[in-house]
Amino acid sequence: MGKKKREQGRLRCGRCKLKAPRDLGSKAAESWNGKWIKGELTLVLCPDCQTPEEFTEAEVNAAELRVGAEGGGLFVADPVICTTGGSVSEGDILYGHDHLSRIVLTGRDASIQLARNLPDGTRCVATVGGVMIYLPSQTLSPMPRRPIDDGGENGPTRT
C-alpha cells in the first residue's frame, strides 16, 4: 500500500489541517481534542488551534471520565443502548432512549452498540461521549452530574 493511501485514514485538525499523531494513545496525542456530537466525532483540534475554553472543557471532561473509571465504572462510547434484558428476554432500558428514538424516526441504526443482559441494580450514568456502567457490586460509583440520556452532546473530549 502506498504512502498516500495509508495517509488517507489519518485524522487532521479541523482548522489548520495538521495531521494527528498516528498513535492516538501516545504522549504526542494527549493535547489533541475531539468534539463529539450525538456519539459521532465531528471535529479534531490540534493543541495550537484550541481556544482556551475548548482546552478547559476538554480537561474537565477528561477528569470526569477518570473519576468514573476510578469509581469502578466501565466507559462505553455512544451510541450505545444499555438494557437488563437480552435478545430473548425483556428487560429495562437503562440508557439510550434517545438512540432508540432516532432509529425509529430514521430507520438507521448508525452502528449502535448494545450492552445487554446487565444485572438488576446496574446503574448507567451519562457522561462525556457515552455512558459509565456501574455493576451492582461496585458501590463507590459517583452520583450523576448530568441527566441521563442527554443526547451525547457533551462537547470536546480528549482523544
Image (cartoon, rainbow, N blue to C red):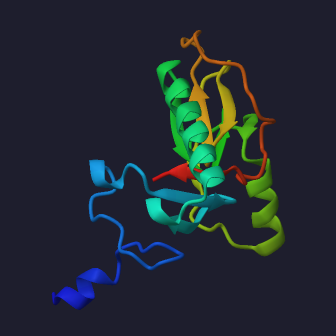
* Location of residue 30 in the rendering, given as x and y in whole percent from the top left corner: 38, 49
* Location of residue 44 in the rendering, given as x and y in whole percent from the top left corner: 51, 66
| Residue 23 sits above or below residue 66 on the image | below
x 34%, y 56%: residue: 24
Out of 1 and 52, give the one closest to the viewer: 52
Which quadrant, please, contains the N terminus? Answer: bottom left
x 28%, y 81%: residue: 7
Out of 92 and 62, give the one closest to the viewer: 62
Left or right: 31 as drawn, with respect to 37: left
* Location of residue 155 in the rendering, given as x and y in whole percent from the top left corner: 67, 53
x 57%, y 21%: residue: 135
| Residue 150 sits above or below residue 153 on the image | above
**Total number of numbered labels?**
0
* Location of residue 85 in the rendering, given as x and y in whole percent from the top left corner: 66, 36
Q: Quadrant of residue 82?
A: top right
Q: Quadrant of residue 122?
A: top right
x 60%, y 58%: residue: 51
Whether residue 9 can be seen here = yes
Whether residue 26 can be seen here = no
